[in-house]
Amino acid sequence: MLMNKEYAPRYIVSIFGVLAALLLLSWNLNVAHADAVQDGAQISIAGNGQVMVRNAQVVSVSGSEIVAMTGWGSTAITWTIETSGSTRFTPENGSRAALKLIKKGDLISFSGELDTSLSHPTVIATVVRDNSLVQESAVISGTVLSVDVARALIDISTQNGTSTIALNQGTTITRDGAPVGIEQINPGDTTKAFGTLAVATHTISALKITVQPGDAASAGSTKTVASGGIFSTIIRWLRSPGILTIK
């Protein structure tokens, strides 16, 4: 077929333009796919065999064994994670309870020692964190139901039910803008807590709590204060800052 010389340059430019657009579209799709698969996964292996893996996706859970995968584009690594009674889980629900909460598709982070006697990547886990059960920078608010000064716990009523605020050594509390202690929080007060929420247990490890006065005579509410302020202070100081609960 003969082509008019006048239109030949335009035709060639159009063809190259279409090809360039197709190549750009293909590249964008590949990049988007790689980002979706990677999803923030990180791996660190020290010379002594200590392994730290972040954001691995759970493939299966069987007994005390978890199988999870990290991937970047077409490259994937499948990990076998061996847990035991000494493995620390976050949220802290005990090893058996925590394993029941972990499910296929969850993103987990774990660390431990690489089992070099096996040919496939196997980690004897010391710590396992289910990222899908933990909400960072969470905020919950509600009315105070009870205050346990000795255990540094506050139960509140929210729109979604009952939640627990757990205080730790670094928690700050303010009432009307002024710093106060947990013993100055009363049932019926309105409170808002900022921190890390354990979704399964509806417990928030609070970094900051704001309180507004309410009805101190709220029905069915209690306030427990341990005898001897020094013991309450010691107990609060010893509390682990990693207590979480699910919403």
Image (cartoon, rainbow, N blue to C red):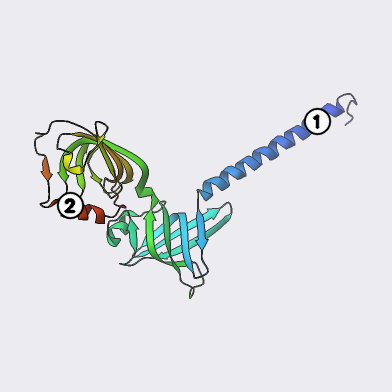
Q: Measuring 17% from the left and 52% from the top, which residue is drawn there?
A: 232
Which residue position is annotated with label 1?
13
Q: Nearer the viewer, residue 55 or 197?
A: 197
**Image location of residue 193, percent across then percent down:** 28, 39
Q: Quadrant of the N terminus?
A: top right
**Image location of residue 176, percent across then percent down:** 24, 31
Label 1 sits on a secondary structure element that is helix
Which amino acid type is marked by label 2?
Ser
Quarter of the rendering containing residue 59? bottom left
Q: Which of 136 and 187 is in front in this view?
A: 187
Vertical position of residue 52 compared to residue 117: above or below: above
**Image location of residue 180, percent across then percent down:** 22, 39
Vertical position of residue 187 compared to residue 105: above or below: above
Which residue position is annotated with label 2?
232
Q: Is residue 4 shown left or right of residue 164? A: right
Q: Measuring 12% from the left and 52% from the top, which residue is drawn there?
A: 228
Q: Nearer the viewer, residue 112 or 154?
A: 154
Q: Is residue 173 shown left or right of residue 30? A: left
Label 2 sits on a secondary structure element that is helix
The 10 Å Cα crowd at callout 1, few under 14, some 14 to 19, many 20 or more, is few
Q: Which residue lies furthest to the top in this view?
A: 6
Q: Measuring 25% from the left and 56% from the top, which residue is drawn there?
A: 238
Q: Measuring 34% from the left and 40% from the top, which residue is drawn there?
A: 138
Q: Identify the mark nearer the N-term, 1 or 2.
A: 1
The reply to whether callout 1 and callout 2 are in contact (CB within 8 Å) is no
Q: In which quarter of the image is the C terminus?
A: top left
Which amino acid type is marked by label 1?
Val
Determine the CA span between mark 1 and mark 2: 80 Å
**Image location of residue 48, percent across then percent down:** 49, 70
